[in-house]
Image (cartoon, coloured by chain):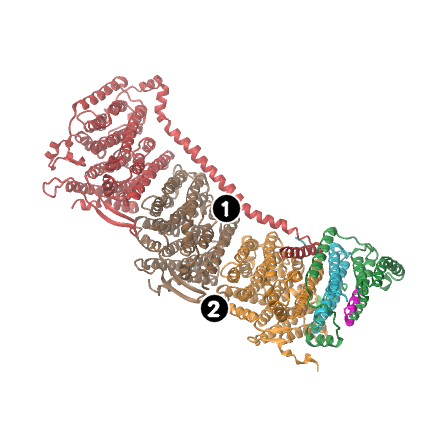
Chain colours: A red, B green, C orange, D cyan, E brown
Amino acid sequence: MGMEQAWLLPAIPVALFVVVALFGRFLPREGDWLVIAGMAATVVLGLLVILDFQGYFEGSAFAPAGENHYAFEWAAIADVLAIDFSTYVDSITVVMIAVVTVVALMVMVYSVGYMHGEARYGWYFALLSFFTAAMLLLVVSGNLLQLYLAWEAVGLASYLLIGFYWERQSAAEAAKKAFITTRVGDVGLLIGIILLWRASGTFEIQEIIALAQSGGFDETYLTVAMLFLFAGAAGKSAQFPLHVWLPDAMEGPTPVSALIHAATMVVAGVYLVARMLPVFDTVLVARDVVLYVGLLTALMAATMGLVASDIKRVLAYSTVSQLGFMFVALGAGSVTAAMFHLFTHAFFKSLLFLGSGSVIHATGRQHVEQLGGLWSKMPVTGWTFLVGGLALAGLAPLAGFWSKDEILYAALSEGGAFVYVTLAATAALTALYTTRLVLLTFFGAPRDSSAHAHAHESPRIMTLPLLVLATLSVVAGVVAFDGVGELLGFAGGIGYLVFTEKAHAFEFHPDIAGAATAASLLAVAAGLVYWRGAAERAARAQAWAPELHRMLVERYYMDHLYQAAVDRIVLGLAGIVAWVDDHIVNRTGVDGGAQGIGYAGLRLKFLQTGRIPNYALAMALGIVTLALVAFGAS
Amino acid sequence: MLRRLPLPSQFDRIIITGGLVAGVALAPLLLVLLVLLAVDEITAPEFVFWLVAAIVVGGALGTVLLPNIVYAALSLVATLLGVAGVYLLLGSEFLALAQVLIYGGGVVILLLFGLMLTNATDDPVVTDGSQKPFAAMVGLLLAGVIIAAAYDATWGGSELAATSLRAFGERLFGDFMVPFIIIAVLLDIALTGAYVNARRERAPAGDDQEASS
Amino acid sequence: MNPALDYEYALLLPELILAGTAALVLFADAFRREFGVSRRLLPWLAVAGAVVAGLVSLTYAGRSENFSELLTVDDFTTFFRVLFAAILVVLVLGSHEFVERHVRHVGEFYALLLLATVGAIFMSAARELITAYIAIELLSFSLYVAVSLTLADRRSGEASLKYVLLGGVASAMLLYGLSLLYGVAGSTYYAEIAEAFSSGTAAFEWALVLGLALVIGGLGFKASAVPFHMWTPDAYEGAPLPITAFLSATSKAAIVALLLRVFGGPLLPAIDEWQWMVAALAVLTMAFGNLIALQQSNIKRLLAYSSIGQVGYMLMAVTAVSAETSSALLLHIAGYLVTNLAVFVVVIAVHNRTGDERIVGFRGLAETQPFLALVLTAGLFSLAGMPLLAGFATKFFLFQAVASEGFLWLSVVAVIASTVSLYYYLQVIRQMYLYPPDADAERWRPSVTGLVTTGGLLAGMVFIGLYAGPVFELADQAATALFA
Amino acid sequence: MIPLENFLLLSAALFAIGFYGVLARRSAILILMSVELMLAAVSINLVAFAAYLDPEGLTGMIFAIFVITIAAAEVGLALGIVLRLYRERQTANVDAADELKW
Amino acid sequence: MTENDGLLLLALLLLPLGSALLLMLVPSRERSAIIALTAASSLAMFAVSVYVFLSYDYGSSEQFQGVRAWTWMENVGILGEKGIQLKVGIDGIAAAMVLLTGIITMAGTWVSWKITHRTKDFFILLYILAAGVFGTFVMLDLFFWFLLYETAVLPMYLLIAVWGSTRKEYGAMKLMMMLVAASILIFAGIFAIYTEAGLGTFDLEALFSADYPVSFQKLFFPVIAIGCGTLGGLFPLHSWSPDGHAAAPTAVSMLHAGVLMKLGAFGIIRLGFQVLPEGAEFWAPGLLTLGIVAALYGAVSALRQTDLKLMTGFSSVSHMGYVFVGLGTFNAIGITGSVLQMFAHGVMTALFFLLIGAMYDQSHDREIPHFSGMAKQMPVWAAFFVIAGLASLGLPGLSGFVAELHIFIGAFRAYPLVGGLAVLTAAITATYLLRMFAQSFFGEMHPAWSGMREMTWPERAGSAVLAGSILWLGLWPSPWIDRIAATVEGLQGVAL
């Protein structure tokens, strides 16, 4: 029992999806219990897979290279094309399994409270289940096509969940935007996958890696292919320039944002690049692209997070920024750091989202200008939110601190000073906007009294996941240390979970960590001093540098640019093509041809004048012509 | 009915005028031919041929060119008689006879009746159609083409053989009996057609009543 | 001893029966008061004559004999004899009501149809130019008169005048051409002409080409080949509807039979001299007929132009004449006749009721008269060469045969033309199915004979369309006889 | 001796003149006359060929006699129809007969 | 598949024809009898087509299976030995197409029970159409093949012009005339092939193995390809498709876009690839070019359409463009993909038209901007629509992806740039479909549509069958791929 059954991980939730989607309304409570029970089972199964991977069932031998390849022929054409379904489990996979199953379970439990009384309640749970299935399928995929299938499936789930409140036009638009934007990346991904197949003849990831490492690819070709592949990752993980969909995706229910748009789906890109990193390692140009795109995204998103007023949007920018951190790590060649940060980020970011959901649930408001002073009314939410915020800000000893430290270390050692400094500054910005968020939400005078008046702590079923996640946010970083893992009984320590190639214990780098921590603390202090819970300050910031503020609020005008590009260029082109089709192909070509024939008939029929001499003349001319032509010919 | 024919008031005039015109036109030709005959350029049959040909062609031209419809009809008579002469030259007395009888005795009278019944004599001048130039062009081209073909060809024999009326009769009433019978049917049909169309329509009552009885 | 007595007149029995019936009809009509005969008897008399003639003709199947070197009685003749007799039967059955209403001279009408049929048969049987010519004139004269038979309609007289005057010109052209051929080949007998050409006695020179051009022009007039077709639409429109049908059926088939006999026989050795002329006429005919038909609003005129177009297909087969093409052409003619008659019988039935010759007069027929509308639709689709119906199969074989003779381009032109034709046929179908009938249109019952006739024709169309084999074999036998 | 070509020449002229008449004249009766001219040309041709080339068969002469007969019949038939035209339109001009067209 | 199964293939032709004949005998007032008869016959057709599909043995070396021939005419006129036979038999491609036809005919029948105007006539014509389609797929005689091919076009004019909507006369006439005009080229091709082969038989198997000079093949392959391609919506001869589909009644749109357009591509394979392989190889890049242009062009045009059916029509042009891309790759993967696409697009577009029809029958409006929030009023309808749309935009797990994937791979194998453009087209497809969803299905519901009712049960059943097929092919495509690939690998000259 264990890795061989990895395929069950997606199978259980997808079966539940089918059951609940089709028959949910005939079940008590629309079947939410079924989904949660199934999810719990999946968590257990995931744990079994992880333990199996850790060699738990094989004595105490440390066997990190353990993998499982289970294949099922899906489509095949002669000897040229074989598409199998296969599962593959390695250290990256188990991290993902852990993150996905745990966060999903927490979010589902939380949703029981949050979504209580909503229309399409059962459908919501069915979709969550479907999403989890797709995500799990994605992480256990052994080949790229299966991964692509799951990749699109999570996109679909995301689309449906963002558009869950589809009666709101904005939700429908956001869903559309998310799908189309990621779809643009997916075009790249699919092209990349097919390009890899074209050169290697296989979709199996491990075979491609082996081939790449043995130099089986042309380098330029491989670079191009990997860049296409990365386009897919960038789309899904909201990296510049495809980041625009994620903030809008907050139109979905908040637990969904926590699960999909913070913890799991958006890290699929990170997962993909991490999975393919051995290949990236052979083409460093592509890896550098990953690094700098990540860096740019991290910085840009952090600055946008400074001015956003919607809690969820701030968190969304933060997510984009943190994903940038992970890509920087990958670009620096450190799978360890990236996956570690992915791991910790999943917990504290979903915590923050769920916390904001709790706030929204209580007040019905989600703009910080309308909040404030909730600390006393919602203590559990407040405390857990604070924990999450500090983790995000990267303050020791919370989870975020450890993983961010690893990334900064990787950045310094691989990327050089410029990367390090920029990244550290971004980390400081993170601390700054986190401070702003916490302060404006929970402290200071309430700015909307009616909302404040009937604000209340959320029910137990919602606070329980908050507490669990808060706990994880605290300890998740620490478990990386060998000793902790061994204490828990894991052979070799839990930290080995995130090792891909060589056994490498986490090291603490006091100099780097110290510098970054100092910067973050400074930022927190500055934030405390500046905002102190007063909303007017926000307005003052606007007055201080209106152009800059406006640029940040308008997200560097990227959305405008895209909108214009779509409206002017794409729709303009479509207009031209439609015009050509209507006027030239259709009216001139087809109708015109038909009319031309009809017109010929109309002209010709007037030859038939009705007069006998004319008729006779026609006959005479006929004869004379025949005779003359004949004479001329002979 | 007879009173409506162009007789006799115009008849003499037409005959005299026609004769004069024909005489004036034919005189030079006659002269030329006589000279040619005298110097033995042409034989006697040729002399006759050209004379007859002149009458035929002249009459035909008169038929299609004369503005007066009555004159045109009379020119036709000249042509048809000329054609009978051609038959004689070719040694076919029977055909010449038939030509004179059928045309002279039948067709021309019929045509004159036609002229009379359509009151053509009230307004004897007919105009030609507007496509006269085309007609002339087509006529010339056609004549040219046919003549070219006639002279280009190498015809099997060049001797005019004597024909026997008896052989002709045996062929006609022996081998070609069936076509001959068909011709009879055909004439009957023509008669029916002429009768049906030419007779003045009665009031459209009698027959229909009978038909529905 | 008169040699005429030696001939086996029994060979001409069907024609004698038809002609005798014609005489009987005329006689019965003329003396109907004396004998108390109703005019309603006349069509049945004609039908009886035609049926007997057709049955008698069948007994000649498989034989191949000459009548006085002028006429042949072989399978080819038999094929057309039966076909013409059948057309006569169908036409009389389908139109006797119409004749009662619109034609004054009923006796003459049926007599002319019978005599025209005799002419048509002789055209297909002739093996000598004079006979062929006389046969053509027998058919033509009958039709000149028949076209003029709707005395109440000014158009009828006009049509007849055009037909007869231009027919005279065409006859003159044809005769001039024949005279040149006679001069070149030295004989009017097909066999001797063929002998003269193939043995090289006759020279291929301008006179021959000119003669061929004139013959093609003259016959082209009878067949309504462009540009000698000009009389066709006018005569079709002016004529009583059954005569229009006859013009487009028997008259067409007869001239094609004659063309096959002449161009497939005596003139075959001179094929290089005339092939391009016929091809040119075929192309022109297909193009003009179908293009002008696009712009018609009168059903008779539409069908006239359509039948001109159809002549183009047949001329195309004459261009590529061979045993295979001929058999395909004969099959096509059989299919065409069934189809065309179906169309005409329905048009006659409808016109008989509504008196409307416009295409819009068919408005809503699908509701008032579903069966007739179905037959008409099937007929029009078949004319356009749509599948499941005779038109598709017969055209397919015809065009394939022509293509196989090396005239692929001509086949393609023909397919294009028949595609164009679909458009105007659809215009009629559109009126029937898409629009409701006029408010005052009543539901009426067509006569039993009309229903039986149309039903039979529909069955024939579908039969030939789906299982042309038997008919094809008959056609093949006939064509084989022609080239034996 | 008269060469055959002379007769053909005469016939060609007659035929062309007749055709001209058909095309140029407006009176139906004159058109009929022109047709008669054309048919006469045909007869000359046929008789000439028969006399020169086919003295035993004489088919051409038989043909000619049929042509003459048919020409006569045609005149009779056509005149009847011309009379009808005249009765219906008060003219024998063929231009009047143009109701049927296009 | 045994020889006796040939009788079943014949049954596929005779079932609809027989039903049409039987229907003629039923009085048009007996609605229930008409419905019972059509229900029975549509189920029978479906059952037989499923059986035929499943019993095609792809492991066998026999390419054509279930071959049975009945002599029709021989040794007469132009025909020689075995001149024309009624010869049935299928290969893997035809097997898939037969199944497609069975599915769509059944669904089309069900949704047509709503029709009240001259129901009987409608079904008669519809079944003649179905007979033509089934027949074309199973015939192995060129004469009958073409006869039935044309039969499938024959009833189209009346079906659209009598029972259609918006500009129906124009659409009907245009569709009919363009398709028949295109047949001119097929006629020409058939005449030329028959003459060139000189066998005196229309037996396709004999014609496949005949020798044709390369120059002949190069000359006539485009003739066949353009002729058949027009029915397949080949750019730039596609313009009958949007107008015709927009005008046609639901079931006819379904059958036409779903199956009839496939006849065109099928014709290219049968007459083009199988008879003239060297010509096909020579011209494959041309086909590919036209295909990719059509794919992009159709997708971009669809972006600007506001009429739902016009949009779907242009979408069909785009998707059929993929089919031609697949054929043009001239390798086994691409061609397999294009046959898969024929199936996938057939089912998906039929579902589209079914759903559009279900709505249009109530609203009599198809302008996308006029609608919003329809999912509230008609959730089941919207759900099916989304499934069809997602299949259309190539979402993995649905039929469209499987097909497109093979085409992409094939295209990348041959011409990577074309492959890239093809993948890009999928993104454009997503754009116009999602725009439409966001506009029409989601957002506030417009009160004007509050009277709209959910689909009827026959419509739901039909949608379920079609959606089921979409999922089946999307999740487990092996049954199709095995059969199709077995045949495609056998095509002469096709690269692996």
Amino acid at dot 2: Asn
Residue ID for mark 2: E75
Mark pair 2, 1: CA separation? 50 Å
Label 2 or label 1, whichever lies nearer to me, is: 2
State which quarter of the image contains the C terminus of chain C: bottom right
Compared to residue E379, the image places residue A468 above or below, namely: above
Residue A562 placement: quadrant: top left
Q: Secondary structure at mark 2?
A: loop
- The chain containing the residue under callout 2 comes to E
Q: Is residue A408 left or right of residue C89?
A: left
Amino acid at dot 1: Thr
- Residue C142 appears anywhere in the view: no
- The chain containing the residue under callout 1 comes to E
Q: Nearer the viewer, residue A609 or B133?
A: B133
Graded by Cα atoms within 10 Å as few (under 14), some (14 to 19) or many (20 or more), the crowding at tag 1 reads: some
x, y percent for residue C154:
71, 58
x, y percent for residue A152:
31, 41
Of the numbered discs 2 and 1, the one sitting upstream in the chain is 2
Read off the magenta span. Answer: B80-95
x, y percent for residue D23:
73, 55
Tell me if residue B85 is in the magenta stretch.
yes
x, y percent for residue A355:
25, 30
Q: Nearer the viewer, residue C270 or A26?
A: C270
- Residue E479 appears anywhere in the view: yes
State which quarter of the image contains the N terminus of chain C: bottom right
- Looking at the rendered structure, whether the residues under marks 2 and 1 are on a common chain is answered as yes
Pointer 2 and pointer 1: residues touching (CB < 8 Å)? Answer: no
Residue ID for mark 1: E166
Tell me the residue at 30%/45% (across/down): A21
